[in-house]
Protein backbone atom coordinates (compact mmCIF):
# COMPACT_ATOMS: atom_id res chain seq x y z
CA UNK A 1 0.00 0.00 0.00
CA UNK A 2 2.95 2.31 0.72
CA UNK A 3 4.14 1.96 -2.89
CA UNK A 4 0.70 2.84 -4.26
CA UNK A 5 0.50 5.90 -2.02
CA UNK A 6 3.95 7.01 -3.15
CA UNK A 7 2.99 6.72 -6.82
CA UNK A 8 -0.34 8.46 -6.17
CA UNK A 9 1.33 11.44 -4.47
CA UNK A 10 4.02 11.51 -7.14
CA UNK A 11 1.39 11.63 -9.87
CA UNK A 12 -0.42 14.48 -8.09
CA UNK A 13 2.83 16.43 -7.83
CA UNK A 14 3.57 15.98 -11.53
CA UNK A 15 0.01 16.96 -12.50
CA UNK A 16 0.26 20.08 -10.34
CA UNK A 17 3.68 20.94 -11.81
CA UNK A 18 2.49 20.60 -15.42
CA UNK A 19 -0.55 22.81 -14.86
CA UNK A 20 1.61 25.28 -12.94
CA UNK A 21 3.98 25.37 -15.92
CA UNK A 22 1.08 26.13 -18.27
CA UNK A 23 -0.14 28.90 -15.97
CA UNK A 24 3.39 30.31 -15.65
CA UNK A 25 3.78 30.53 -19.44
CA UNK A 26 0.51 32.48 -19.74
CA UNK A 27 1.36 34.80 -16.86
CA UNK A 28 4.91 35.40 -18.03
CA UNK A 29 6.38 33.99 -14.81
CA UNK A 30 9.37 31.60 -14.70
CA UNK A 31 8.06 28.07 -14.99
CA UNK A 32 10.60 26.74 -12.53
CA UNK A 33 9.39 29.20 -9.87
CA UNK A 34 5.95 27.61 -10.04
CA UNK A 35 7.49 24.11 -9.75
CA UNK A 36 9.26 25.32 -6.62
CA UNK A 37 5.96 26.70 -5.35
CA UNK A 38 4.21 23.37 -5.87
CA UNK A 39 6.80 21.63 -3.70
CA UNK A 40 6.58 24.29 -0.99
CA UNK A 41 2.77 24.10 -0.98
CA UNK A 42 2.68 20.30 -0.65
CA UNK A 43 5.35 20.45 2.06
CA UNK A 44 3.69 23.24 4.03
CA UNK A 45 0.37 21.39 4.26
CA UNK A 46 2.29 18.17 5.06
CA UNK A 47 0.86 16.29 2.08
CA UNK A 48 4.41 15.01 1.60
CA UNK A 49 7.16 14.98 4.20
CA UNK A 50 10.71 15.14 2.84
CA UNK A 51 13.76 16.09 4.92
CA UNK A 52 16.69 14.14 3.45
CA UNK A 53 19.47 16.57 2.49
CA UNK A 54 21.61 13.72 1.11
CA UNK A 55 18.86 12.49 -1.22
CA UNK A 56 18.04 16.04 -2.36
CA UNK A 57 21.74 16.57 -3.08
CA UNK A 58 21.87 13.32 -5.07
CA UNK A 59 18.81 14.26 -7.15
CA UNK A 60 20.36 17.66 -7.74
CA UNK A 61 23.59 16.12 -8.97
CA UNK A 62 21.76 13.79 -11.39
CA UNK A 63 19.49 16.57 -12.64
CA UNK A 64 22.33 19.04 -13.19
CA UNK A 65 24.33 16.39 -15.03
CA UNK A 66 21.53 15.89 -17.57
CA UNK A 67 20.54 19.58 -17.74
CA UNK A 68 24.11 20.59 -18.58
CA UNK A 69 24.59 17.73 -21.07
CA UNK A 70 21.31 18.52 -22.81
CA UNK A 71 22.10 22.23 -22.81
CA UNK A 72 25.45 21.50 -24.44
CA UNK A 73 23.77 19.32 -27.07
CA UNK A 74 21.40 22.16 -28.00
CA UNK A 75 24.20 24.74 -28.29
CA UNK A 76 25.79 25.21 -31.70
CA UNK A 77 29.52 25.87 -31.61
CA UNK A 78 29.19 28.32 -34.50
CA UNK A 79 26.92 30.45 -32.28
CA UNK A 80 29.12 30.50 -29.17
CA UNK A 81 32.47 30.82 -30.99
CA UNK A 82 32.20 34.63 -31.36
CA UNK A 83 31.38 34.97 -27.63
CA UNK A 84 33.72 32.29 -26.29
CA UNK A 85 36.17 34.70 -24.63
CA UNK A 86 33.64 36.89 -22.77
CA UNK A 87 31.64 33.79 -21.82
CA UNK A 88 34.66 32.12 -20.22
CA UNK A 89 35.67 35.31 -18.40
CA UNK A 90 32.13 35.75 -17.06
CA UNK A 91 32.05 32.09 -15.99
CA UNK A 92 35.28 32.40 -14.00
CA UNK A 93 36.22 35.97 -13.11
CA UNK A 94 32.57 37.02 -12.92
CA UNK A 95 31.78 34.26 -10.43
CA UNK A 96 34.78 35.10 -8.21
CA UNK A 97 33.97 38.81 -8.23
CA UNK A 98 30.33 38.12 -7.39
CA UNK A 99 31.30 35.84 -4.50
CA UNK A 100 33.76 38.39 -3.13
CA UNK A 101 31.40 41.37 -3.38
CA UNK A 102 28.39 39.54 -1.94
CA UNK A 103 30.46 37.85 0.79
CA UNK A 104 31.80 41.20 1.97
CA UNK A 105 28.26 42.62 2.02
CA UNK A 106 26.94 39.67 4.05
CA UNK A 107 29.81 39.94 6.54
CA UNK A 108 29.05 43.58 7.35
CA UNK A 109 25.26 43.37 7.14
CA UNK A 110 24.63 40.12 9.05
CA UNK A 111 25.11 41.64 12.54
CA UNK A 112 22.27 44.09 11.81
CA UNK A 113 19.95 41.08 11.43
CA UNK A 114 21.13 39.48 14.68
CA UNK A 115 23.58 37.01 13.09
CA UNK A 116 27.32 36.99 13.75
CA UNK A 117 29.23 35.35 10.88
CA UNK A 118 32.93 34.87 10.26
CA UNK A 119 34.28 36.19 6.96
CA UNK A 120 34.80 32.60 5.75
CA UNK A 121 31.16 31.78 6.51
CA UNK A 122 29.98 34.94 4.74
CA UNK A 123 32.07 33.97 1.69
CA UNK A 124 30.61 30.45 1.83
CA UNK A 125 27.06 31.81 1.65
CA UNK A 126 28.06 34.02 -1.28
CA UNK A 127 29.92 31.20 -3.07
CA UNK A 128 26.85 28.93 -3.09
CA UNK A 129 24.91 31.50 -5.11
CA UNK A 130 27.74 33.04 -7.14
CA UNK A 131 26.86 31.30 -10.42
CA UNK A 132 23.85 31.81 -12.63
CA UNK A 133 21.56 28.82 -12.94
CA UNK A 134 21.68 26.91 -16.24
CA UNK A 135 18.25 25.30 -15.72
CA UNK A 136 16.58 28.69 -15.21
CA UNK A 137 18.44 30.45 -18.03
CA UNK A 138 17.98 27.65 -20.58
CA UNK A 139 14.26 27.20 -19.84
CA UNK A 140 13.40 30.91 -19.81
CA UNK A 141 15.42 32.02 -22.85
CA UNK A 142 14.34 29.08 -25.00
CA UNK A 143 10.66 29.21 -24.05
CA UNK A 144 10.32 32.93 -24.83
CA UNK A 145 10.96 32.45 -28.57
CA UNK A 146 12.57 35.90 -28.50
CA UNK A 147 15.63 36.85 -30.48
CA UNK A 148 18.41 38.88 -28.82
CA UNK A 149 20.86 41.12 -30.65
CA UNK A 150 24.68 41.13 -30.29
CA UNK A 151 24.84 37.34 -29.75
CA UNK A 152 23.45 37.76 -26.25
CA UNK A 153 21.54 34.49 -26.03
CA UNK A 154 24.50 32.20 -26.81
CA UNK A 155 26.66 34.29 -24.45
CA UNK A 156 24.18 33.96 -21.57
CA UNK A 157 23.70 30.24 -22.20
CA UNK A 158 27.46 29.66 -22.41
CA UNK A 159 27.99 31.55 -19.16
CA UNK A 160 25.22 29.73 -17.28
CA UNK A 161 26.30 26.34 -18.61
CA UNK A 162 29.98 26.76 -17.72
CA UNK A 163 30.04 28.84 -14.53
CA UNK A 164 28.78 26.13 -12.15
CA UNK A 165 32.27 24.55 -11.87
CA UNK A 166 33.74 27.77 -10.48
CA UNK A 167 30.96 28.12 -7.90
CA UNK A 168 31.27 24.42 -7.03
CA UNK A 169 35.02 24.69 -6.41
CA UNK A 170 34.58 27.80 -4.24
CA UNK A 171 31.75 26.16 -2.28
CA UNK A 172 33.59 22.88 -1.61
CA UNK A 173 36.78 24.72 -0.67
CA UNK A 174 34.99 27.06 1.75
CA UNK A 175 32.92 24.23 3.26
CA UNK A 176 36.19 22.47 4.10
CA UNK A 177 37.70 25.65 5.54
CA UNK A 178 34.67 26.42 7.73
CA UNK A 179 34.24 22.79 8.84
CA UNK A 180 37.93 22.33 9.76
CA UNK A 181 38.50 25.85 11.06
CA UNK A 182 41.44 26.54 8.73
CA UNK A 183 42.30 29.87 7.13
CA UNK A 184 41.94 30.35 3.38
CA UNK A 185 44.98 29.15 1.40
CA UNK A 186 44.59 31.12 -1.83
CA UNK A 187 47.50 29.38 -3.62
CA UNK A 188 46.06 25.95 -2.86
CA UNK A 189 42.64 27.13 -3.97
CA UNK A 190 44.04 28.41 -7.27
CA UNK A 191 45.98 25.17 -7.85
CA UNK A 192 42.82 23.11 -7.20
CA UNK A 193 40.81 25.31 -9.53
CA UNK A 194 43.29 25.02 -12.41
CA UNK A 195 43.62 21.25 -12.05
CA UNK A 196 39.85 20.67 -11.88
CA UNK A 197 39.15 22.93 -14.84
CA UNK A 198 41.89 21.47 -17.04
CA UNK A 199 41.01 17.86 -16.22
CA UNK A 200 37.29 18.58 -16.62
CA UNK A 201 37.71 20.33 -19.97
CA UNK A 202 40.11 17.70 -21.34
CA UNK A 203 38.06 14.68 -20.30
CA UNK A 204 34.84 16.38 -21.36
CA UNK A 205 36.15 16.87 -24.90
CA UNK A 206 37.72 13.41 -25.01
CA UNK A 207 34.64 11.59 -23.76
CA UNK A 208 32.50 13.68 -26.09
CA UNK A 209 34.46 12.45 -29.11
CA UNK A 210 34.40 8.87 -27.80
CA UNK A 211 30.62 9.13 -27.33
CA UNK A 212 30.17 10.26 -30.94
CA UNK A 213 32.33 7.34 -32.13
CA UNK A 214 30.38 4.82 -30.02
CA UNK A 215 26.98 6.14 -31.11
CA UNK A 216 27.89 5.92 -34.79
CA UNK A 217 29.73 2.58 -34.68
CA UNK A 218 27.58 0.41 -32.43
CA UNK A 219 24.76 -1.27 -34.34
CA UNK A 220 21.53 -1.51 -32.33
CA UNK A 221 19.24 -0.22 -35.07
CA UNK A 222 16.90 -3.15 -34.50
CA UNK A 223 16.13 -1.54 -31.09
CA UNK A 224 16.65 2.19 -31.78
CA UNK A 225 15.30 3.24 -28.37
CA UNK A 226 18.46 1.82 -26.80
CA UNK A 227 20.47 4.67 -28.35
CA UNK A 228 18.86 7.00 -25.79
CA UNK A 229 19.91 4.66 -22.99
CA UNK A 230 23.43 4.46 -24.40
CA UNK A 231 23.79 8.24 -24.63
CA UNK A 232 22.44 8.60 -21.10
CA UNK A 233 25.06 6.11 -19.88
CA UNK A 234 27.81 8.05 -21.67
CA UNK A 235 26.71 11.30 -19.98
CA UNK A 236 26.66 9.74 -16.49
CA UNK A 237 30.01 8.00 -17.10
CA UNK A 238 31.62 11.27 -18.23
CA UNK A 239 30.45 13.06 -15.09
CA UNK A 240 31.30 10.32 -12.60
CA UNK A 241 34.70 9.32 -14.04
CA UNK A 242 35.84 12.93 -14.27
CA UNK A 243 34.80 13.54 -10.66
CA UNK A 244 36.63 10.41 -9.48
CA UNK A 245 39.93 11.58 -11.00
CA UNK A 246 39.55 15.03 -9.34
CA UNK A 247 38.32 16.86 -12.41
CA UNK A 248 35.20 18.99 -12.52
CA UNK A 249 32.35 16.75 -13.62
CA UNK A 250 29.92 19.60 -14.31
CA UNK A 251 32.29 21.24 -16.80
CA UNK A 252 33.12 17.86 -18.36
CA UNK A 253 29.52 16.86 -18.96
CA UNK A 254 28.66 20.27 -20.47
CA UNK A 255 31.62 20.13 -22.89
CA UNK A 256 30.81 16.50 -23.76
CA UNK A 257 27.24 17.54 -24.62
CA UNK A 258 28.61 20.42 -26.70
CA UNK A 259 30.82 18.02 -28.66
CA UNK A 260 28.01 15.50 -29.21
CA UNK A 261 25.64 18.25 -30.31
CA UNK A 262 28.04 19.56 -32.95
CA UNK A 263 28.90 16.24 -34.64
CA UNK A 264 26.62 14.12 -36.78
CA UNK A 265 25.32 11.15 -34.80
CA UNK A 266 22.76 8.51 -35.63
CA UNK A 267 19.14 9.08 -34.55
CA UNK A 268 19.90 12.67 -33.52
CA UNK A 269 16.26 13.82 -33.71
CA UNK A 270 15.02 10.97 -31.55
CA UNK A 271 17.80 11.58 -29.02
CA UNK A 272 17.09 15.32 -28.87
CA UNK A 273 13.40 14.66 -28.21
CA UNK A 274 14.21 12.15 -25.47
CA UNK A 275 16.70 14.41 -23.70
CA UNK A 276 14.40 17.42 -23.95
CA UNK A 277 11.57 15.51 -22.27
CA UNK A 278 13.88 13.88 -19.72
CA UNK A 279 15.43 17.25 -18.85
CA UNK A 280 12.01 18.77 -18.18
CA UNK A 281 11.07 15.80 -15.99
CA UNK A 282 14.26 16.12 -13.94
CA UNK A 283 13.79 19.88 -13.60
CA UNK A 284 10.26 19.35 -12.31
CA UNK A 285 11.39 16.66 -9.85
CA UNK A 286 14.38 18.72 -8.70
CA UNK A 287 12.45 21.91 -8.02
CA UNK A 288 9.59 20.06 -6.34
CA UNK A 289 12.01 18.20 -4.05
CA UNK A 290 13.81 21.42 -3.14
CA UNK A 291 10.44 23.02 -2.44
CA UNK A 292 9.46 20.06 -0.24
CA UNK A 293 12.75 20.19 1.64
CA UNK A 294 12.54 23.81 2.74
CA UNK A 295 10.79 24.75 5.99
CA UNK A 296 8.37 27.52 4.97
CA UNK A 297 7.94 28.76 8.53
CA UNK A 298 11.71 29.04 9.01
CA UNK A 299 11.90 30.81 5.66
CA UNK A 300 9.54 33.52 6.93
CA UNK A 301 11.48 34.22 10.13
CA UNK A 302 12.57 37.91 10.12
CA UNK A 303 16.31 37.14 10.29
CA UNK A 304 15.98 34.90 7.22
CA UNK A 305 13.35 36.86 5.29
CA UNK A 306 14.98 40.28 5.63
CA UNK A 307 18.50 38.94 5.15
CA UNK A 308 17.47 36.99 2.04
CA UNK A 309 15.64 39.93 0.49
CA UNK A 310 18.51 42.33 1.29
CA UNK A 311 21.15 40.01 -0.19
CA UNK A 312 18.96 39.22 -3.21
CA UNK A 313 18.38 42.87 -4.06
CA UNK A 314 22.05 43.72 -3.44
CA UNK A 315 23.11 40.92 -5.78
CA UNK A 316 20.66 42.00 -8.50
CA UNK A 317 21.33 45.75 -8.45
CA UNK A 318 24.94 46.02 -7.18
CA UNK A 319 27.01 42.82 -7.18
CA UNK A 320 26.00 41.26 -10.50
CA UNK A 321 26.24 44.55 -12.49
CA UNK A 322 29.61 45.36 -10.91
CA UNK A 323 31.02 41.90 -11.66
CA UNK A 324 29.57 41.98 -15.20
CA UNK A 325 30.90 45.40 -16.19
CA UNK A 326 34.31 44.64 -14.66
CA UNK A 327 34.56 41.28 -16.47
CA UNK A 328 33.44 42.79 -19.80
CA UNK A 329 36.03 45.62 -19.80
CA UNK A 330 38.34 43.86 -22.35
CA UNK A 331 35.52 43.30 -24.84
CA UNK A 332 34.54 46.36 -26.87
CA UNK A 333 32.00 44.74 -29.19
CA UNK A 334 29.18 44.93 -26.64
CA UNK A 335 27.16 48.09 -26.13
CA UNK A 336 26.31 49.53 -22.74
CA UNK A 337 22.74 48.28 -23.14
CA UNK A 338 23.99 44.77 -23.89
CA UNK A 339 26.17 44.78 -20.77
CA UNK A 340 23.21 46.01 -18.73
CA UNK A 341 21.07 43.16 -20.04
CA UNK A 342 23.78 40.58 -19.31
CA UNK A 343 23.95 41.85 -15.75
CA UNK A 344 20.17 41.62 -15.44
CA UNK A 345 19.91 37.99 -16.58
CA UNK A 346 21.93 36.75 -13.60
CA UNK A 347 19.23 34.29 -12.64
CA UNK A 348 19.60 32.11 -9.57
CA UNK A 349 17.74 28.81 -9.37
CA UNK A 350 18.34 25.20 -8.42
CA UNK A 351 22.15 25.27 -8.41
CA UNK A 352 22.57 27.70 -5.46
CA UNK A 353 20.04 25.70 -3.44
CA UNK A 354 21.85 22.44 -4.24
CA UNK A 355 25.20 23.95 -3.26
CA UNK A 356 23.61 25.26 -0.04
CA UNK A 357 22.96 21.63 0.93
CA UNK A 358 26.70 20.94 1.22
CA UNK A 359 27.07 22.75 4.59
CA UNK A 360 24.08 20.72 5.90
CA UNK A 361 25.58 17.37 4.86
CA UNK A 362 28.91 18.40 6.45
CA UNK A 363 27.19 19.34 9.73
CA UNK A 364 28.37 22.95 9.77
CA UNK A 365 26.89 25.26 12.41
CA UNK A 366 24.11 27.53 11.10
CA UNK A 367 23.89 25.37 7.95
CA UNK A 368 20.08 25.51 7.97
CA UNK A 369 20.27 29.29 8.17
CA UNK A 370 22.58 29.36 5.15
CA UNK A 371 20.19 27.14 3.20
CA UNK A 372 17.15 29.27 4.04
CA UNK A 373 18.89 32.53 3.12
CA UNK A 374 20.06 31.09 -0.22
CA UNK A 375 16.54 29.76 -0.87
CA UNK A 376 15.06 33.21 -0.23
CA UNK A 377 17.63 34.87 -2.50
CA UNK A 378 16.68 32.41 -5.25
CA UNK A 379 13.00 33.27 -4.90
CA UNK A 380 13.80 37.00 -5.06
CA UNK A 381 15.93 36.46 -8.19
CA UNK A 382 13.28 34.39 -9.98
CA UNK A 383 10.53 36.89 -9.14
CA UNK A 384 12.43 40.10 -9.93
CA UNK A 385 14.67 38.97 -12.79
CA UNK A 386 12.89 35.88 -14.09
CA UNK A 387 9.61 37.69 -14.75
CA UNK A 388 11.32 40.55 -16.59
CA UNK A 389 13.74 38.75 -18.91
CA UNK A 390 11.61 39.53 -21.96
CA UNK A 391 10.41 43.01 -20.98
CA UNK A 392 13.94 44.14 -20.08
CA UNK A 393 15.19 43.11 -23.53
CA UNK A 394 12.31 45.07 -25.12
CA UNK A 395 12.96 48.11 -22.92
CA UNK A 396 16.66 48.14 -23.84
CA UNK A 397 15.85 47.69 -27.54
CA UNK A 398 17.80 44.43 -27.79
CA UNK A 399 15.01 42.04 -28.78
CA UNK A 400 13.47 41.08 -32.09
CA UNK A 401 10.81 38.62 -33.14
CA UNK A 402 12.49 35.28 -33.74
CA UNK A 403 10.98 33.78 -36.91
CA UNK A 404 9.31 30.42 -36.47
CA UNK A 405 9.07 27.91 -39.28
CA UNK A 406 5.64 27.29 -40.83
CA UNK A 407 6.71 23.77 -41.80
CA UNK A 408 7.28 21.48 -38.82
CA UNK A 409 8.55 17.97 -39.45
CA UNK A 410 11.49 15.74 -38.63
CA UNK A 411 14.14 15.04 -41.26
CA UNK A 412 15.84 11.61 -40.98
CA UNK A 413 19.50 11.89 -39.99
CA UNK A 414 20.80 10.01 -43.01
CA UNK A 415 19.36 12.62 -45.42
CA UNK A 416 22.15 15.05 -46.24
CA UNK A 417 19.94 17.60 -48.02
CA UNK A 418 18.84 20.66 -46.06
CA UNK A 419 15.29 21.98 -45.83
CA UNK A 420 14.60 25.71 -45.59
CA UNK A 421 11.58 28.00 -45.59
CA UNK A 422 11.51 31.04 -47.89
CA UNK A 423 8.95 33.85 -47.70
CA UNK A 424 7.79 35.16 -51.08
CA UNK A 425 8.11 38.95 -51.49
CA UNK A 426 6.86 41.31 -54.19
CA UNK A 427 10.43 41.88 -55.44
CA UNK A 428 10.78 38.16 -56.17
CA UNK A 429 7.83 38.29 -58.58
CA UNK A 430 8.87 41.25 -60.75
CA UNK A 431 10.04 38.91 -63.56
CA UNK A 432 6.88 36.80 -63.37
CA UNK A 433 4.61 35.30 -60.73
CA UNK A 434 4.95 31.60 -61.53
CA UNK A 435 7.34 29.19 -59.90
CA UNK A 436 9.33 28.70 -63.10
CA UNK A 437 9.95 32.46 -63.27
CA UNK A 438 11.96 32.30 -60.04
CA UNK A 439 15.37 31.01 -61.03
CA UNK A 440 16.56 28.95 -58.09
CA UNK A 441 19.88 27.03 -58.09
CA UNK A 442 19.98 23.70 -59.90
CA UNK A 443 20.38 21.71 -56.69
CA UNK A 444 17.27 23.28 -55.14
CA UNK A 445 13.64 22.17 -55.38
CA UNK A 446 10.42 23.76 -54.06
CA UNK A 447 8.44 20.86 -52.58
CA UNK A 448 5.57 22.58 -50.78
CA UNK A 449 3.75 25.92 -50.62
CA UNK A 450 1.82 27.33 -47.66
CA UNK A 451 -0.80 29.99 -48.43
CA UNK A 452 -3.28 31.16 -45.80
CA UNK A 453 -2.78 28.00 -43.68
CA UNK A 454 -3.38 25.79 -46.75
CA UNK A 455 -0.63 23.55 -48.14
CA UNK A 456 -0.19 22.29 -51.71
CA UNK A 457 2.49 20.82 -53.98
CA UNK A 458 3.53 23.36 -56.66
CA UNK A 459 4.26 22.87 -60.34
CA UNK A 460 6.21 25.05 -62.73
CA UNK A 461 3.12 27.03 -63.81
CA UNK A 462 1.86 27.51 -60.22
CA UNK A 463 1.19 31.19 -59.56
CA UNK A 464 2.79 32.54 -56.41
CA UNK A 465 1.61 35.41 -54.25
CA UNK A 466 3.43 37.75 -51.92
CA UNK A 467 3.30 36.24 -48.44
CA UNK A 468 3.44 32.61 -49.60
CA UNK A 469 5.83 30.36 -47.70
CA UNK A 470 7.96 27.96 -49.77
CA UNK A 471 9.50 24.79 -48.40
CA UNK A 472 12.68 24.18 -50.39
CA UNK A 473 15.20 21.35 -50.26
CA UNK A 474 18.77 21.83 -51.42
CA UNK A 475 21.90 19.74 -51.79
CA UNK A 476 24.02 22.91 -51.90
CA UNK A 477 22.89 25.24 -49.14
CA UNK A 478 25.71 27.74 -49.72
CA UNK A 479 24.59 28.25 -53.33
CA UNK A 480 21.00 28.67 -52.10
CA UNK A 481 22.06 31.26 -49.52
CA UNK A 482 23.86 33.25 -52.20
CA UNK A 483 20.80 33.15 -54.48
CA UNK A 484 18.54 34.22 -51.60
CA UNK A 485 20.82 37.19 -50.98
CA UNK A 486 20.78 38.15 -54.68
CA UNK A 487 16.97 38.01 -54.74
CA UNK A 488 16.75 40.23 -51.65
CA UNK A 489 14.89 37.61 -49.65
CA UNK A 490 14.94 38.38 -45.92
CA UNK A 491 12.64 35.62 -44.71
CA UNK A 492 14.60 32.36 -44.75
CA UNK A 493 14.49 29.86 -41.92
CA UNK A 494 16.27 26.54 -41.68
CA UNK A 495 13.66 23.85 -40.96
Image (cartoon, helix red, strand yellow):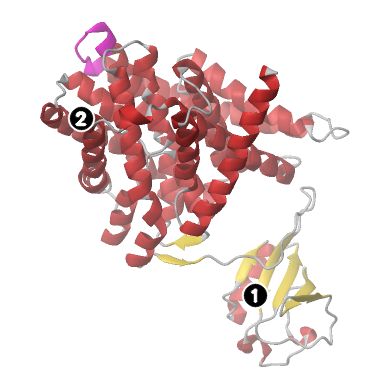
Q: Is residue 98 magenta?
A: no
Residue annotated with mark 1: 483
Residue in front for this viewpoint, 29 or 181: 29
Extent of the magenta region: 177-187
**Count of numbered labels shown in the rendering:** 2
272 vs 120: above or below: below
Q: Is residue 18 visible?
A: yes
For residue 222, which quarter of the picture?
A: top right
Question: What secondary structure is marked by label 1?
Answer: helix
Q: Position of residue 289 (x, y in %)?
A: 50, 29
In which quadrant of the rendered image does the N terminus lie? top right
Q: Is residue 168 left or right of residue 1?
A: left
| 3D distance between C-alphas at marks 1 and 2 | 56 Å
Residue annotated with mark 2: 103
For residue 198, which quarter of the picture?
A: top left
Q: Is residue 359 left or right of residue 49?
A: left
Q: Nearer the viewer, mark 1 or mark 2?
A: 2
Q: Position of residue 116 (x, y in %)?
A: 14, 21
In which quadrant of the rendered image does the C terminus lie? bottom right
Q: Is residue 426 left or right of residue 124?
A: right
Q: Is residue 182 magenta?
A: yes
Q: Position of residue 104 (x, y in %)?
A: 16, 30
Amino acid sequence: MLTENFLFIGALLLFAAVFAGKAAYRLGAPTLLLFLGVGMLFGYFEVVEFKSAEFAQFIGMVAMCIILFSGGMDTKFAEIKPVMAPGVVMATMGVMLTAGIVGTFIYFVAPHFGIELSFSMALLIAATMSSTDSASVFSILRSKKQGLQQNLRPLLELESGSNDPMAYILTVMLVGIVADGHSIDWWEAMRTFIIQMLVGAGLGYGFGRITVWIMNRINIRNIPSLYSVLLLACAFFTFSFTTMVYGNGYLAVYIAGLVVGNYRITYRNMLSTFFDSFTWLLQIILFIILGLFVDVEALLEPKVLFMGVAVGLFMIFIARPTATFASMIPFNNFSGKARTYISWVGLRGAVPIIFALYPITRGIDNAEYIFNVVFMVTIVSLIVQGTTVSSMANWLGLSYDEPESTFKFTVPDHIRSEFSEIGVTASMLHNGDTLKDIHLPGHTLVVLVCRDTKYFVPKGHTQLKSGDKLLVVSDDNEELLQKVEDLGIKHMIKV
